[in-house]
Amino acid sequence: MSIHLDGRGSLYEQVYRGLRGLILDGVFGPGSKLPTSRAMGKELGVSRNTMLNAYQQLVDEGYAQGIVGSGTFVARSLPDEARRPGAQIPSPKRRLKLSTSSYAQRLLKHAPRAGASWRLPRHHLPYDFRYGEPAYNDLPLETWSRLLGRIARNARAGELAYGEPAGPIELRQALAGYLRRARGVVCEPEQILITQGSQQAIDLIARVLVDAGDRVVLEEPHYTGFSFVMGSSGAELISVPTDSNGLQVDNLDALDGIRAVCVTPSHQFPSGGVLSLERRLSLLSWAERENTIVIEDDYDGEYRYEGRPVPSLQSLDQSGHVLYVGTASKLLFPSLRIGWLVVPQDLVRVFTIAKAFTDTGSSGLEQRVLAEFIKQGHLERHVRRTRVRNAARRKALEAAVSRELEGIAELQGTQAGLHGVLWVPELPGSREQDLRRAAAERGVGIYPVHPYYRRRPRKAGFVLGYAALTEREIDEGIRRLAVAIKRLH
Amino acid sequence: MSIHLDGRGSLYEQVYRGLRGLILDGVFGPGSKLPTSRAMGKELGVSRNTMLNAYQQLVDEGYAQGIVGSGTFVARSLPDEARRPGAQIPSPKRRLKLSTSSYAQRLLKHAPRAGASWRLPRHHLPYDFRYGEPAYNDLPLETWSRLLGRIARNARAGELAYGEPAGPIELRQALAGYLRRARGVVCEPEQILITQGSQQAIDLIARVLVDAGDRVVLEEPHYTGFSFVMGSSGAELISVPTDSNGLQVDNLDALDGIRAVCVTPSHQFPSGGVLSLERRLSLLSWAERENTIVIEDDYDGEYRYEGRPVPSLQSLDQSGHVLYVGTASKLLFPSLRIGWLVVPQDLVRVFTIAKAFTDTGSSGLEQRVLAEFIKQGHLERHVRRTRVRNAARRKALEAAVSRELEGIAELQGTQAGLHGVLWVPELPGSREQDLRRAAAERGVGIYPVHPYYRRRPRKAGFVLGYAALTEREIDEGIRRLAVAIKRLH
């Protein structure tokens, strides 16, 4: 004798509705004993708490009564509203009708349909071109773990207690050196704020500098980490197109009253263009003229394959309008949740307070491990090594595409970073899912580019990440993808 | 030949102003060579960048000129504005006149004068009654480090990649069990959101549920983590007095249109009262009637010395109006930055999205370590052990106070937690600093309670934390404090 969980609403509601149904249908007649919550919970695989809540609810409403020492029994006479058709199901949870803040309502509006997370699903396909993640096999995890264990074991009060909200000074000093050497970033250590990945850096910028109604420029296509946060902050989002040289800066002249421009100059996300020097300079002088802040997301600027890495936009900034955002997610690993934000001197205090009030600081031990990791030269060694590896992977990808997909698809945006975009001109965007499925059947994981566009492109395009694959896998993956594409035509 | 740093404004400005002064005063005559930035920087202990910025600024403005290969020279004719009295000091930083958001302006208004951090200064006094921190010597740091090293070393892609924004399910399951056993909290694992300490939990609540202008009730005295965040969110703050039974709930009836009530029921912070059962029940029914959320900060509820710990307010909540906030800061160590927020079912999604957009999640490896730490029973063993130790410390404190300060000072709020408040009725609040100084001279660190009051109390009171001291230290510390107090009278 069990109940049916209809899958609508919370487990609690389903159990409650199921039991209530059986009582109303007379399956459990008046005065009859209900199965124990434990027994029924086990049968349904539902936790004890949920069962007890549901039983209690039935008792509260007069459908059943608990008799101490003997169990729960169906009431001899059912409550009236039970007969009211479509009686609202009251629920301890549902009864709560708390309105949320205007921020929360915007959050829900901008949230990806998939729920809270915009991570890619893990398909565990043998040839998975997922992007936005480094090659975990390349990580010096042994070194990292050794430092982590040692620093934790020897941690003294100073390292276990609350730390500087902006991060331990030794990390900010080490980072200032690294950022200057690797990215040309010019700053004092105290201008650096350690954040929970670049996401928190962007969120703090929005909170400290953007009010609802402010006009914020996004690249088209754009990194959704920007649009989610800026949209939720109530900003009016304005798209400016990009091409192989990045943001089309000239289009900014037509705009005014812009509060902030969100850019990915080193490797436009996701289309892959690199912002030309000419455009960098005109963007900076425009920003100074308009007194607009420029948010530079330098998420994978270390990976540049032709010539030296392009220095950051911040390195060219004379007037202090650029806020520089970086992250350890692509250099080390995302779940470390360490990023950095470089702000102009006169914004240091307010950003530090914002970080302090928001979470009082990031993980103390892991920040110290990163400081050691940089000081001992591990980070730069690691980046040099992976740059070579990723260059080989990239070469394999370009070779495979031009061999297998000549005239059928074109690969763009691979001068830098860890991904490119594969466009399939003959395939309409509406059929992206068909190709995705066909590829998956052949063990190949590909990911549509359209979620990053505010206006969906006509032709099908896919973001191909190559950092996590071997050259052989890249080769075979593209071969199989080519078969899938040709079959589809 | 050096310059004077006047301590006003950023280092950059001081250097710039100093150099400019020497030039205007003719100390560096027209055409004369300036010391190299490196030499002067070394002398002043100022970084190369700062010096270079300052020199560049002087050149930009015509005070000096750089001659490649030979150095920087004072200009033969000084720019006109140099003679304008009180000429504004332009600065690459100051030139940036970015207005900040209304949130940022409220942040600055509510920030503690001390700057961003409200941590206590570390005096390194032998008898330091600092509070808000556990005894670091009691920590099973060896076990923690072993787990940390092992989990990091064996981390696979799934653990290094972006994780669930709300935290890995195994941690939320382990916590759900722990919170039910230790604090009577009734929830499903999916109702738990892992946060960056309790501070982020409070900040997320403010963002998701509180709009500017909403009325929020604070205890008087209150935890400043609440007032900073709620004040910055633009809420109207309303104080309700507390006594030895915690918040005087009856006073709520006189209020209406209250959005949220911020309480510390297990151990009122800082005054130390424990909210009576009667008041808990009437607070809950009031909240249900008024449809107001109750934010329960259960920061040290595990430490209860007479009888069993009082279960959380959340455990009594039938209507889902309580949001439960907890933290590992007192159980383990603050720099871990792990806390938790338990929300009613129908708020799970919006809070998860808020966490995701705010920072995409907390540190993956450390969350897994905590999950293991709980599953293997280490946390509960540790809490049991420290409860015994802290009980002994508390006993020592009470004994020492009644022996040394009979009739001079009274200790309150020690039924639970890791601190009490020592009131000195004869000493006016205005003289707290005198006593603090006198105590420090005798090697004793004490901390005034008034910062937690919106209306400053007339008599002097001090928060005495005892968790970080041995019984002997507590004994001797109070003996010395007594001497200091008596001398002051």
Image (cartoon, coloured by chain):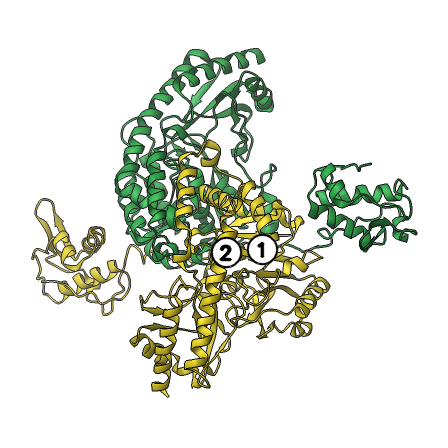
Chain colours: A green, B yellow
The residue that disc 1 covers is: B182
**Which corner quadrant of the image does residue B438 belong to?**
bottom left
Q: x and y percent of residue A388 in the render?
A: 31, 25
Query: Element type at marker 1?
Result: helix
Q: Nearer the viewer, residue A22 or A310?
A: A22
The local crowd at label 2, few if under 14, some if 14 to 19, many if 20 or more residues have their Cα within 10 Å, is some
Q: x and y percent of residue B424 in the render?
A: 44, 82
Q: Nearer the viewer, residue A439 or B154?
A: B154
Circle 2: residue type: Val
Specify whether disc 1 shares its chain with disc 2. yes
Query: Element type at marker 2?
Result: helix
Q: Nearer the viewer, residue A441 or B370?
A: B370
Q: Is residue A295 left or right of residue B30?
A: right
Circle 1: residue type: Ala
Q: x and y percent of residue B134 in the render?
A: 43, 60
**Which corner quadrant of the image does residue A283 belong to?**
top left
Q: Residue at x 79, y 36 (%)?
A: A4
Is there a contact, CB below 8 Å, between mark 1 and mark 2? yes
Label for residue B383? Answer: 2
Real-space Cα distance between discs 1 and 2? 10 Å
Q: Which chain is home to disc 1?
A: B
Q: Is residue B476 left or right of residue A24?
A: left
